[in-house]
Amino acid sequence: MTFSSNKSRAVALLRVSTPEQQLHGESTELQLQRIHLASDRNRHHITKVFEEGYSGWQRDYRPVLEEMFAYLEQHKDEIDAVYVYSIDRFTRKGTHSYVELKRRLLALGIQLIDTTGIIQPEQNTLADLGFEYEWSSRSPSRLAEHLKAEIAYEEITTMQTRMIGQEIRLAQQGYVVRGANIGYRNMKVEDELGKKKTIHIPDPDEAPWIRAIFQLREEGLLSDKEICVEVNAMGFRTRKFPVRNRATGQLNGFRGGKPLTPKMLQRYVCNPIYCGIKVEKWTNNQPVRCPFEGLVSIDTFNNANRGKITVIELADGTFSISRTAIASKDMKNSTYPFRHVVQCKDCNKQLHGSASRGKTGKKYHYYHCKKGHVRIRQAEMHQKLKSFCQSFHLTPKRVPLIDQIIRDVWEEKQESMEKRQNIAQQTKTELLTQQRVLLDKIIHVRSEVVQRKLEEQIETLQQQVEAIPKEEKAPQLKVTQIEDFITYIKTVVEHPDKMLLCGLSMRLTEKIWQMFFEELPTYEIIAGRTPELSHGIRLFSPSKVPENNLAGTIRLEWNYLCEFIRENLPLFKALHLLFNKVK
């Protein structure tokens, strides 16, 4: 196939749909190599090469293709042909798109040539009679070209239907069909039929960041900005991704590697994938249980979202998602900052705050019980609370002594536990040895009476083995928890009145009061200044626990103290950060 023309210049259009095709398919290098072979046969010199990195399915967004046409407009008197590897590299949008693009080339007097030899130059069917009309100029390969264009269209339709359809089915089963969310990484597993499917598993580096976000959000002690500071201190950075030129696929740099921001935090906290629930367009926006464990529980997810998003498991095993406004309990109320931390003595319900308007139009603010048992003026309540909180006399100087006593008791518990475990193991070993001896005797005894007696003895020994207590766990506190407790508790006991009267968010205020008292106080207790302090706080009150009774009290109330430290350690840390920041 040769073309005679005064022009001998041509351009090449190369296209790959994906980076994978560039590496493992009909790469641009292979396409250009074939184009050079064809252009040499036709005595064309390739003067410019255009490379696309888009799917041929697209027609509205192919900037390189439009760039090529703009170039051809400027050099239409110099360019003789456009070379493509094959028709499906030119377009996959079907006959209509192919004809439209080819007509644009012919209008410029430029031929379209493919390396497979399907496209033939147009011929005049009336050339032997010396006439030519628009309808008499046609390509002998017209039907073959249209067929190839339709085949390319059908191929992409079939391929997309098969691939996208399968991904939709997998998504509706809860499997992963895209890249892993931060905190996870993807892993292939086989189902019961041996088919490989993708699930999320925790990423060892990123999962602790996501869990910390949910845990701190659930505790409700830090603002979102403060949570970001904490998690960034753990090393949080978004993933880095290569940025490539969409047209050429060339690497232009990387994006990502950014610290956590409140906006990011909100996006992560609201994503139910972290509690093992998938919700997306392909699940018809309905929640689906994933076949893998989430990084947090559904309860933790719901608590962290504070009522804004709630995942609900229904009786039939399916799930629903409720979206509401943030619960008002999280909000700060400067008018009634201590509502919900003082109880009614009659019904043991927390008080609320509201105002009534007098005849003059003036507002009168009250704390009250919803059932009407208690009604106290706001100013009176605040004055009593201030006096009540300032009456505390805690002793921060006890911190080193309490630290040493807790460590001593911890070591005693550890030694005692190890001794009991050693005794239990020795007893178990002796009983098992006796069992083996009796089993050896049974083998050599022929008397059925003796065999039965030996079996009874073996059964008795087995019951004794099973009665031995299982291995005990280590003391309820870790050494790191003791160290953190001592580090942060000093801030709490230095200024108990400031802690109790801090007037922060309702959630934080309630947690502080619950930390100080065994039960939230009533107004009568506040007025009489007779509160029941919690086990941990009592240790720092000389009037409640004299210094010479500290060791005995800690030993006697060890389990309560361990529970107090475990439950309130995040609060100690948060208050330490907040009040030291203020200082």
Image: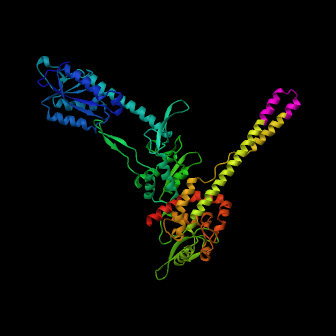
Residue 46 location (% of width, % of height): 19, 27
Q: Is residue 327 visible from the viewing direction of this image? A: no
Residue farthest to the top, as pictured: 128
Residue 169 location (% of width, % of height): 47, 37
* Between 438 and 518, the one nearer to me in the picture: 438
Q: Which quadrant of the rendered structure holds the N terminus?
A: top left
Q: In the figure, is residue 237 to the left or right of 315?
A: left
* Between 114 and 578, the one nearer to me in the picture: 578
Q: In the figure, is residue 508 to the left or right of 421?
A: left
Can you tell which quarter of the image residue 538 is in? bottom right
411 lies above or below 333: above
Q: Which residue is found at the position 83% from the left and 26% from the top?
A: 444
Please name the predominant secondary structure of the magenta segment in the image: helix
* Between 186 and 2, the one nearer to me in the picture: 186
53 lies above or below 129: below
533 lies above or below 483: below
Q: Which quadrant of the rendered structure holds the C terminus?
A: bottom left
Residue 295 location (% of width, % of height): 51, 46
Residue farthest to the bottom, as pictured: 360
The reply to whether the magenta stretch includes residue 440 is: yes
Query: Which residue range is magenta in the image?
Result: 434-453
Q: In the figure, is residue 467 to the left or right of 288?
A: right
* Between 318 and 383, the one nearer to me in the picture: 383
Q: Which residue is found at the position 29% from the left and 31% from the top?
A: 15
